[in-house]
Amino acid sequence: MGNTASARAKVVDETLRCVGFQTLAITTDAQSLTLPTSAQAAQCQVQDQPIRWRADGTAPTSTVGAEANDGDEITIQGRATMRSFEVIRHSEGSAGGTLVCHYYG
């Protein structure tokens, strides 16, 4: 599996099994994922408020980074990309946004 991130809904490789789950409260500080040891991919859904994200090792800001809105799914493949992935509240968002992730390995 390569290292990729996408804001389109995808089916994670069917040969992988779910190895973890995380609910991340989105704030005004950039946050990274807490990866299970065996995770090779993550499928996350944005809930309630818009976010910005980056997966290039540079922290997003409330005005810089890829946008994702309530209901959007983000699929991240490859441990290096998952380790580099960070998320922050969008400048147009208010308190209460969440990123819900399932991890696969």
Image (cartoon, rainbow, N blue to C red):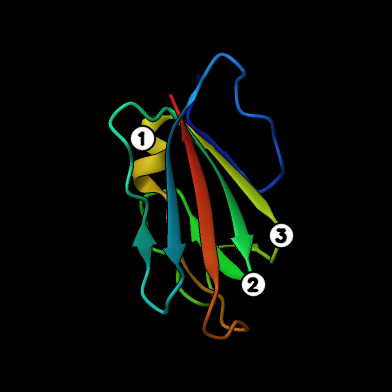
Q: Decide which of tag 1 and tag 2 comes sooner along the chain.
A: 2
Question: Which residue is at a point 36% across and 75% down the rendered structure image?
Answer: 29
Which of the marked residues, 3 or 1, is nearer the chain's N terminus? 3
Name the mark nearer the viewer: 3 or 1.
Answer: 3
User: Dot 2, how many residues are within 10 Å of its Cα: few (below 14), some (14-19), or many (20+)?
Assistant: some
Vertical relation: 27 (above or below) 77: below
Q: Secondary structure at mark 1?
A: helix
What amino acid is found at the position of numbered circle 2 in the picture?
Asp
Quadrant of the image containing the C terminus: top left
Disc 2, SS = loop
Closer to the N terminus: mark 2 or mark 3?
2
Residue for badge 1: 80
Q: Is residue 1 above or below residue 34?
A: above
Q: CA distance from mark 2 to mark 3?
A: 8 Å
Q: How many marks?
A: 3
Q: Which residue is mark 3?
A: 71
Q: CA distance from mark 3 to mark 1?
A: 25 Å
Q: Residue at x 65, y 62 (%)?
A: 68
Q: CA distance from mark 1 to mark 2?
A: 28 Å
Residue 51 vs 28, above or below: the answer is: above
Of all residues, the one furthest to the top in this rendering is 15
- Residue identifier under label 2: 48
Q: SS of the residue at dot 3?
A: loop
Q: Point out residue 24 in the picture as x, y percentages from the top left corner.
A: 43, 61
What amino acid is found at the position of numbered circle 1 in the picture?
Answer: Ala
For badge 3, the amino acid type reads: Gly
Residue drawn where x is 69% and y is 35% of the image? 10
Where residue 67 sits in the image (x, y, percent)?
Answer: 63, 64
Q: Which mark is residue 22?
A: none
